[in-house]
Image: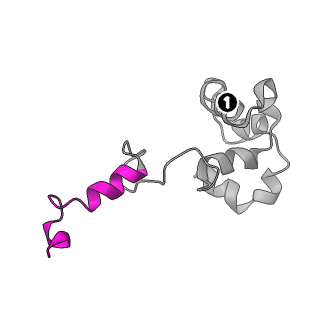
Amino acid sequence: MMIKILRWFEVFFALIPIKHVMKLFFFSYEFANTVALPMVALFLGTGNYAPEVPTIMLERLCTSPTYGMWYPTDKLSVASNLPVRLISILENHPVKNPKRHTR
């Protein structure tokens, strides 16, 4: 839900640092320092400056298909454990869908 709100008001959140938004959405200190800030520091290369990065960068990192770090969202689970390429291969596999590969 937080990501949707960030997307709706992206102009506003483009100016607010991540450290303030974590408090605004009532995320714990442990979550911010264990998940959110290291993710930004690692993938954007910001290091100790991660708490000062604009929040919209965190949103883009989690949702963008071009420079994001996650696979597309899965409607049935929190995170899909199969890579996108493997999923497309399995969907077209003749054993799973025999009618698709009839000649």
Say which residue appears at 68% left-offset and 58% top-offset.
7
Q: Quadrant of residue 6?
A: bottom right
What's the residue type where badge 1 is placed?
A: Leu
For label 1, the residue is: 42
Inspect this view and state whether residue 100 appears: yes
Residue 59, given in percent of the width and then of the height, sits at: 67, 49
Between residue 30 and residue 84, name the one nearer to us. 84
Q: Is residue 76 visible?
A: no
Q: Is residue 93 left or right of residue 25?
A: left
Q: Position of residue 72 (x, y in %)?
A: 48, 54
Q: Residue furthest right?
A: 15
**Magenta residues, as a range?**
84-103
Give the image location of residue 16, x and y in percent: 83, 45
Q: Is residue 40 left or right of residue 87?
A: right
SS at mark 1?
Answer: helix
1 to the left or right of 47: left
Q: Residue at x 22, y 59 (%)?
A: 93
Between residue 32 and residue 73, name the one nearer to us. 73
Q: Please state which of residues 47 and 51 is positioned toward the viewer in this rendering.
A: 47
Q: Quadrant of residue 26?
A: top right
Q: Say if 59 sits above or below 93 in the image.
A: above
Observer-nearest of 56 and 21: 56
Residue at 69%, 30% in the rendered image: 37
Does the magenta run of residues contain 37?
no
At horizontal 75% and vertical 38% (from top left) the residue drawn is 18
Q: Where is residue 64, by image quadrant?
A: bottom right
> Neighbour class for label 1 at 10 Å: few (<14), some, many (≥20)?
few
Q: Say if 82 sits above or below 31 in the image.
A: below
Q: Which secondary structure class fits the magenta region best? A: helix
* Above or below 9: residue 2: above
